[in-house]
Image (cartoon, rainbow, N blue to C red):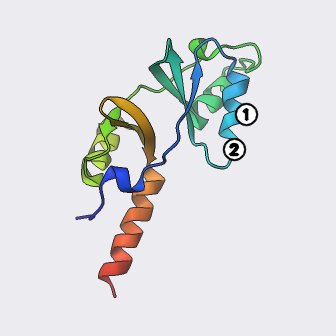
């Protein structure tokens, strides 16, 4: 068992862009070192998630990112988990939904996100403590 809860290891900042914005802006955000995904919103509500996988799909479809709005892009589904849940719960949800990340909520508001990378780091930290 990993002795961590999602809130302790999640990324605290999720970039949000409205669906009318161009995909090129989301791609710019994805190149920043602390950004793994962009939450695409409609009237402030999450509509889908745009990540590196979606960039690959756009390139494969030969769709220009400068001309395509985020609302017209392929998006991953919004799957949320409360920050108080365990990492085991998050890992099961990722596996069940075939995702590498979850949006993290507190009182039904998005407060960050969790990636498979954060889970790996928590496992390594936990194993490091138990092997001493």
Looking at the rendered structure, which numbered label has been put on residue 32? 2
**Residue 69 figure quarter:** top right
Q: Answer above or below: position of 48 versus 125.
A: above
Badge 1 crowding class, 10 Å Cα cut-off, few under 14, some 14 to 19, many 20 or more, is: few
Where is 52 relative to 26, above or below? below
Residue closest to the eye, 77 or 122: 122
Q: Position of residue 83 (x, y in %)?
A: 32, 44
Give the x, y percent position of residue 3: 26, 65
Asked if one can make out residue 99 in the rendered structure from this viewpoint, the answer is no
What percent of the width, then of the height, locates residue 41?
Answer: 51, 19
Q: Position of residue 19 (x, y in %)?
A: 58, 14
Residue extending farthest left: 1
Dot label at residue 28: 1
For the C terminus, which image quadrant?
bottom left
Numbered disc 1: secondary structure: helix
Side of 114 where 3 appears, left or right: left
Is residue 18 shown above or below 5?
Answer: above
Query: Separation of disc 1 and disc 2 at Cα?
Result: 7 Å
Residue at 69%, 31% in the rendered image: 27
Q: Say which of 26 and 93 sits in front.
A: 26
Residue, far front: 107
Tell me the quarter of the image containing the N terminus.
bottom left
Residue 132, visible in the rendered structure = yes
Q: Residue at x 35, y 36 (%)?
A: 105
Up-down relation of residue 28 to residue 3 (above or below): above
1 and 2 marks in contact (CB < 8 Å) = yes
């Amino acid at each position: 068992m990993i002795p961590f809860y999602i809130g302790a290891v999640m990324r605290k900042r999720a970039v949000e862009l409205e669906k009318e914005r161009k995909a090129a802006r989301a791609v710019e955000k994805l190149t920043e070192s602390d950004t793994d995904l962009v939450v695409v919103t409609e009237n402030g509500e999450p509509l889908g998630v745009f990540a590196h996988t979606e960039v690959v799909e756009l390139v494969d479809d030969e769709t220009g990112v400068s001309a395509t709005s985020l609302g017209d892009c392929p998006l991953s589904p919004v799957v949320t988990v409360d920050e108080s849940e365990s990492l085991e719960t998050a890992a099961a949800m990722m596996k069940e939904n075939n995702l590498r990340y979850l949006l993290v909520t507190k009182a039904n508001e998005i407060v960050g996100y969790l990636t498979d990378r954060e889970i790996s780091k928590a496992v390594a930290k936990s194993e490091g403590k138990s092997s001493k």
